[in-house]
Structures are given as C-alpha cells and as structure tokens.
Image (cartoon, rainbow, N blue to C red):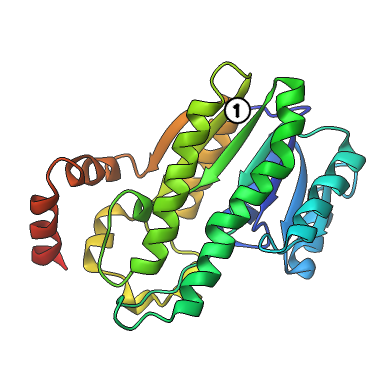
Amino acid sequence: MESLAGQVVVITGASGGFGALIARRCVAAGARVALAARTMTALERLVEASGGPTRAIAVATDVANPDDVARLARTTLNHFGHVDVLVNNAGFGIFDRLADARLEDVRAMMEVNVFGALACTQAFLPHMLARRSGQIVMMASMAGLVAAPNMGGYTATKHALVGLSRTLMLELEGTGVRCAMICPGVAETGFQHRAGAEKYPRIARLSTCTADQVADATLRAIARRTHGEIVVPWYGRLLALISYPLPGATRAVMRLIG
C-alpha cells in the first residue's frame, strides 16, 4: 500500500461514493483527513471509524456556499496546521436530453461540480503556494472528455472542470504544487440514484469501472504527487483520443452503439 504518513488530505463529497472510499484509503495509508459534505451523520461515522479527531475531522460543507468553503479551510488549517492535498470530489448529475433538461438542474450542477471545485481550490491554493508544496486533485469524468446522449448538462459541467484542471496544471508549473485530474467511467455508487441510471447511454458500458478502482487510482496519484490526467479504466482514454480528431467517426460510433 502507498504511504501517506504525515499528510493532511481534505476530501469534499466524503459522505459516500468515491469520497468515502478515498477517505478510508487515505486513513489506512497513514494520512489525517478533513471530511466535507452536507450529511454530517455519515461523516461522523467515518470520523469514528478513522480513529477520532486526531486522525479525522468532519466539517459540514455545501461547496456551493462560499461561507461553508471558507469555514472548511479555516477549520482544517486550525485543527491540523497545514494541508497537503485537496480532493475536489463533490459533485452530482441529473441526466436528460437537452430539449428536456431543466435550467435549474443544470445551474445546480454547475454550482457544485464547477464553481464548488473552483471555490475550494481558491480557498486552499494560497496556503499550498506559500509552502511551495501541495496537490489539487480534481474528480472529473469520462463525460468531461467525450460527449454522450442524455448527459448534456452534466457533460457541460465536467468539460468545464477538465478545462479548469488543465489550466491549473499549466499555472502551477514551477510552484511546487501539483494538479491531478481523475476521469472515471461509469462506476456503481449512490450517484446513479439521482442521475437516473436508466438514462445512461449504452456507450457508457465501454467505460465501466469500480469505485474501488477509482479510489485506488486516486490514492496512487496522491502518493506519487501526480501532475497530469488519469482515466479509469485506462482504455476509456482510447475513445477520448479519437473524439477530438475524428468527431464524425465518434458520432457514428454513438449512433451505432447508442
């Protein structure tokens, strides 16, 4: 197992899904963690299982609320003294064809998936830059690399997050701070209950993975201080690679598979 001994990791969206698994992996690897989500009950259980406040703290956080994000940064730094890694994991999806999508749903996804990640990054990045050490981990998606039917609003948020991540990688060169972008395919988590699993296009079956694979890939990225992009499963990148130079062929594949 990769060692994160002595590191402090902040994880948003930590009450379930990828976030909870990543938190458990980080604690098992020796890290101390600040767990952020809106659901305190689940966070408190995770803190107890992690060994209590010397190893983990829970901070009620809606990443779409600037006051909550500021409190998360302040509480974490006051408690642990420094932060090594921020995992921007909070996010959700609602799937609909664009003709049927509700603007309020798309705005809500933008607030959490994009502006929430940006707000958290801005809250912790000055501290990392001052120390010339740290890492921002962005939980993006294969949907941020390849468009698919029924996912227009969600895909727009993840394409935006991919753009932010790639820009951040450029801006952090020479600062001592790294940025890793994780792009998972479809994994079975609580995400599907809200998104509407029945609306997943069939093409999504080409990029299925497990939540454990995503958590393990994230832990490796943290332990190795990765500065770059990771697609899970790895072969999902093949579809992403052809989508840019061959958009017509990509649409033909989408029509064929659905």
Name the spot of residue 55 as percent of width and height, x first: 84, 42
Name the spot of residue 194 as percent of width and height, x first: 50, 76
Q: Quadrant of residue 134?
A: top right
Q: Which residue is pictured at 51% across the width and 71% down the height?
A: 107
Mark 1 lies on a secondary structure that is: helix
Q: Residues within 10 Å of mark 1 (few under 14, many from 20)?
A: some
Whether residue 205 is situated above or below residue 216 in the rendered picture: below
Whether residue 102 is situated above or below residue 87 in the rendered picture: below
The answer to whether residue 147 is left or right of residue 192 is left
Q: Quadrant of the C terminus?
A: bottom left
Q: Which residue is pictured at 48% across the width and 27% down the height?
A: 170
Pick the front one: 229 or 127: 127
Amino acid type of disc 1? Answer: Ala
Image label count: 1
Pick the front one: 9 or 251: 251
Query: Can residue 227 be seen in this snapshot?
Result: no
The answer to whether residue 120 is left or right of residue 182 is right
Give the residue at mark 1. Answer: 223
Q: Which residue is pictured at 67% across the width and 56% down the height?
A: 14
Pick the front one: 202 or 102: 102
Pick the front one: 56 or 92: 92
Query: Can residue 55 be seen in this snapshot?
Result: yes
Q: Which residue is pictured at 67% across the width and 53% down the height?
A: 12
Name the spot of residue 52 as percent of width and height, x first: 88, 50
